[in-house]
Image (cartoon, helix red, strand yellow):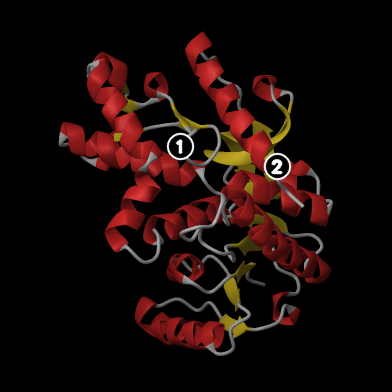
């Protein structure tokens, strides 16, 4: 019996994640969206590409959650983008309602699933999913760190003119301007970039990483990134479905790690078939720790804005 992944939200991020998952033959996929015809049409189009891909997964689109029953993973991408004139608190309240309803339906049909939250503001939406599902922290995760680290790796590889295979980077903290890229733990062929680049160059790369999503929004002018977010979702799903015990940066509900409690914050996480297996605590300098706690304060302010 194949694994099953439900993706709530058949927009660009959800549909692209489905594409990556299907192409790798990781699971049967259910696309759920409230707009009639959109999940059905995208699912059918994707299904018809599988003979070319030589992948035997089944892909189904639906406007309700019944077909999602028995999912191993439910990915929540549904939500509003922030529009002109919309305050941060407006966005939090609007998307909290969407994520709350999606979570309620998801756990109704898949009570043993693992939730991967993608909707922004991500860390606060993870808290919504945790409260509504009443799942243990092992089964509610947020996708942000994989994406943020990929952006950092992209810029580092371009700076050096080397293969991305030579680059490994780590980003902690909340998803957004308060993220905390860690140059000391970011390497090119195993060499920390702090040994290879001056501080001004590192600061420039760090700033571009923190504003990476906004840069794409400004270029597209309508819409936001979806290829890299979709692939990042697949990276987390693969680690879980294949029980890889793989360490990835994810938003996890901390219970004292890094001196932070009862908040979702991006940290290195070991993922396997049960979801979060452990939070990896790395040693931080005083400045890094201060930056992480500043990021946590920003997340806490969002959580306080939840209805």
Q: Quadrant of the N terminus?
A: bottom right
Q: Secondary structure at mark 2?
A: helix
Residue holding disc 1: 177
Figure check: 181 above or below 242: above
Q: Residues within 10 Å of mark 2 (few under 14, many from 20)?
A: many
Q: Position of residue 70 (x, y in %)?
A: 75, 70
Give how far apart the Cα atoms at labels 2 and 1 are.
Answer: 16 Å
Residue shown at 77% from the left, 52% from the top: 307
The x, y position of residue 188, in whole percent, is 28, 28
Q: Point out the tag, 2 or 1, that comes first from the N-terminus.
A: 1
Q: Which mark is residue 303?
A: 2
Residue drawn at 59 percent across, 66 percent down: 78
Q: Quadrant of residue 52?
A: bottom left
Q: Residue at x 48, y 41 (%)?
A: 176
168, above or below 48, in the image: above
Q: Is residue 230 above or below residue 52?
A: above
Is residue 192 visible in the rendered image? The answer is no
């Amino acid at each position: 019996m194949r694994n099953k992944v439900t993706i709530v939200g058949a927009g660009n991020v959800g549909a692209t994640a489905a594409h990556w998952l299907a192409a790798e033959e990781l699971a049967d996929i259910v696309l759920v969206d409230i707009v009639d015809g959109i999940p059905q049409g995208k699912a059918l189009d994707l299904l018809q590409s599988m003979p070319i891909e030589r992948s035997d997964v089944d892909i189904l689109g639906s406007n309700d959650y019944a077909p999602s029953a028995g999912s191993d993973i439910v990915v929540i991408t549904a939500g509003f983008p922030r529009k002109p004139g919309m305050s941060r608190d407006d966005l939090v309240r609007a998307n909290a309602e969407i994520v709350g309803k999606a979570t309620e339906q998801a756990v109704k049909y898949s009570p043993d699933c693992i939730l991967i939250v993608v909707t922004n503001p991500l860390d606060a939406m993870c808290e919504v999913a945790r409260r509504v599902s009443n799942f243990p922290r092992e089964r509610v995760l947020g996708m942000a760190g994989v994406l943020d680290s990929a952006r950092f790796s992209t810029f580092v590889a371009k700076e050096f003119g080397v293969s991305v295979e030579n680059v490994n980077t780590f980003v902690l903290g909340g998803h957004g301007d308060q993220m905390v890229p860690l140059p000391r733990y970011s390497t090119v062929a195993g060499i920390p970039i702090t040994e290879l680049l001056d501080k001004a160059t590192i600061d420039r790369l760090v700033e571009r990483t923190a504003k990476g999503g906004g840069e794409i929004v400004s270029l597209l002018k309508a819409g936001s990134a979806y290829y890299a977010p979709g692939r990042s979702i697949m990276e987390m799903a693969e680690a879980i479905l294949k029980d890889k015990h793989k360490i990835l940066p994810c938003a996890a509900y901390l219970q004292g790690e890094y001196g932070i409690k009862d908040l979702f914050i991006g940290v290195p996480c070991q993922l396997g078939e049960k979801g979060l297996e452990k939070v990896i605590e790395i040693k931080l300098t005083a400045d890094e720790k201060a930056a992480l706690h500043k990021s946590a304060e920003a997340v806490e302010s969002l959580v306080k804005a939840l209805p």
